[in-house]
Image (cartoon, rainbow, N blue to C red):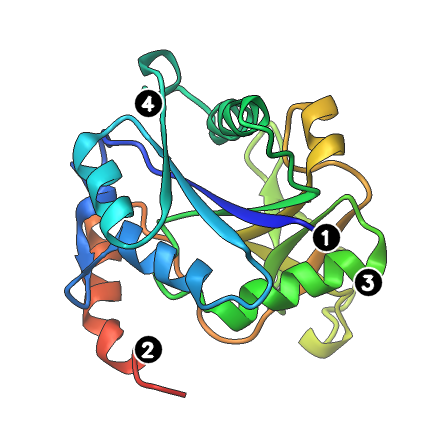
Amino acid sequence: MSIISLIPARGGSKGIPNKNLRTVGNIPLLARTIQAAQSSEKIQRTYVSSDSPELLALAQAEGARTIQRPPDIAGDTASSESALIHALDVLASEGLRPEVFVFLQCTSPFTRGREIDLVVERLQESGAAMAFSASPWHGFLWSASEEGWGIGVNHNADAPRPRRQDLPPCWLETGAIYAIRTEPFVEAGHRFVAPRLPVPIDGWHPEIDTPYDLTICDQAAALFDQPT
């Protein structure tokens, strides 16, 4: 089975300027993601899609192959899917159509190659169209009515409260790893093609969306980057 990784990395970001070039543990976020892909035993090639000359140069220095992203899908409103579809079209024009691609996000700085391999293995074993990394969730989830009143999501708020361990299984999408079969994705145009499979992975898997997230992850890097 041909398997590649695709890493979309825009140059602009309103929340954190030049986010994908910012460092966690003195390593740029893009470089950390490329290194995670390279440590995977399943991924055969790694590609970075970007509109930024700096990010493309960094990707090449890290040993990834690069795809120039056009400006019309590089703005704040552009979806990750638009970058993935463009990248797959570019690769198809060069004669490469992978059976599976692994979409990795730079905002997850502590992704490990073994976690990528686990998600890909579950995809292969299950026959799912896509599989994604998820953290087991054991809390009580709430939403709100139109009036603002609390509504239990994964529990009956009008009944005696159950023990946490008796709640139905829930998983929180980590946003780090998505292993997707190419053909169903191209047909649907979005990543969550059915049947889809959450793959529980252990540990803490933060996403960097704010400067605060970046600071916390940078301080935690010394612990997470220890050899295991």
Label 3 belongs to which residue?
125
Report the residue marked by disc 2: 224
**Along the viewing direction, whichever of 17 and 31 lies nearer the viewer:** 31
Mark 2, residues whose alpha carbon is within 10 Å: few (<14), some, or many (≥20)?
some
Which quadrant holds residue 150?
top right
Can residue 139 be seen by looking at this rendering?
no
- Residue at (32% x, 53% y) in the render: 63
Q: Which circle marks residue 18 in the picture?
A: none
x and y, in percent, of residue 25 in the image: 19, 68
Number of residues whose C-alpha sits closer than 10 Å to that of mark 4, classed few (under 14), some (14–19) or many (20 or more):
few
Q: Residues within 10 Å of mark 3 (few under 14, many from 20)?
A: few
In-front residue for pair 174/29: 29
Please give the name of the residue rendered at 55% of the width and 57% of the height, measured from the top-left corner: 43
Q: Position of residue 221 (x, y in %)?
A: 25, 73
Q: Say which residue label 4 marks.
A: 76
Sequence-first disc among 4 and 2: 4
Tell me the kind of residue under disc 4.
Asp
